[in-house]
Image (cartoon, grey):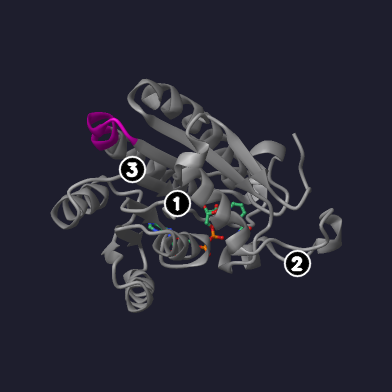
Amino acid sequence: MKKLVEGKIALVTGGGAGMGACDCWKFAEEGAKGILIVDLNVDDAEKVAKEIMAQYPECKCVAVKCNVAKEADVDHCFEVLDQEFGTLDILVNNAGITNKIPFDEMTLEHWNLTYSINITGAFLFAQRAMRIMKAKGYGRIINMSSIAGHVGGLTSGVDYATTKGAMLTLTKSVAKQGAAYGVTCNSIAPGNIKTAMEKVFGSDWDPMAVPMHRLGEPEDISDVVLFLASDMSRYMTGCCLNVNGGLFMQ
Ligand SMILES: NC(=O)c1ccc[n+]([C@@H]2O[C@H](COP(=O)([O-])OP(=O)(O)OC[C@H]3O[C@@H](n4cnc5c(N)ncnc54)[C@H](O)[C@@H]3O)[C@@H](O)[C@H]2O)c1
């Protein structure tokens, strides 16, 4: 039976840890031919690449050091992508940062930092991916938003929440750009998922408040990423899938 992303080439930003790393494993499990694992922390990205290739030798993984906020770094990623794989089928805009700085104390410098990584980074990758995908008439772009993008920041900063709201609009706008060319763009808005970032959000709220009575696991999100990356989601674009154990329903 054909696997869900068989023969596909994927690029995952922030693929060295957390949900991004889990996405890479899912893609390899489901038949991807190649994955460009992009991360500021290249040691983590290389570790993920090495471990995946040990288990799935047919999936070539290449780690690249990149700050998604820096245009030159992003261009470098696409040069490596071209050399190593020559094409792109799936982009996951996953890299992101958060903080718990109170609104009253938020500096412009910090505000701009969050925007440069969480939203400008996604723009830079989506634009370059779209050029390749439009030309080949196929592509899947998946943007990581957040429950905070719908309901506002409570356990996260105002800067974080507003970038995640912008991610929803970026998704719809990019979806409109790509729809006639076979390129879909969808987003996922996770609730609280057990990763390093979740530790920043903090435990000053009760997981029992989640109707399913638990925090999410990275795999709870990566399975949905996989669905959006596959042809099972072929008639969906511009959508946001809320994956949060029932914490927020639309
Ligand atoms: N964990 C949660 O509860 C949660 C909830 C909602 C949304 N999200 C979103 O999901 C995505 C993944 O979150 P996570 O929890 O796996 O995070 P994480 O902190 O565990 O991992 C993020 C990865 O991104 C990388 N990264 C950070 N800044 C970067 C930069 N400038 N350039 C390149 N790489 C960079 C980090 O090195 C790390 O490997 C993020 O966009 C986050 O905002 C997370």
Question: What residue type is disc 2 on?
Answer: Ser
- The image shows residue 77 at horizontal and vertical percentages of 24, 53
Q: Which residues are magenta?
A: 131-138
Classify residue 215 as left or right of residue 225: right
On whether ligand 1 comes within 8 Å of the CB at mark 2, the answer is no
Instruction: State the quadrant of the C terminus.
Output: top right
Residue 206 falls in image quadrant: bottom right
Return the disc, 3 or 1, that comes first in the chain's sequence.
Answer: 1
Which residue is identified by label 3? Answer: 125
Q: Which residue is mark 1?
A: 4
Residue 68 in the image: above or below residue 37: above
- Who is closer to the viewer here, 15 or 123? 15
- Measure the alpha-carbon separation of dots 3 and 1: 23 Å
* Type of the residue with mark 3: Phe
Question: Whole-percent x and y of residue 118?
Answer: 47, 46
Which of the 4 image quadrants contains residue 231? Answer: top left
Q: Looking at the rendered structure, which numbered label has been put on residue 203? A: 2
Mark 3 vs ligand 1: CB under 8 Å? Answer: no
Using the numbered discs, state the Cα–Cα distance from disc 1 to disc 2 in whole angstroms.
36 Å
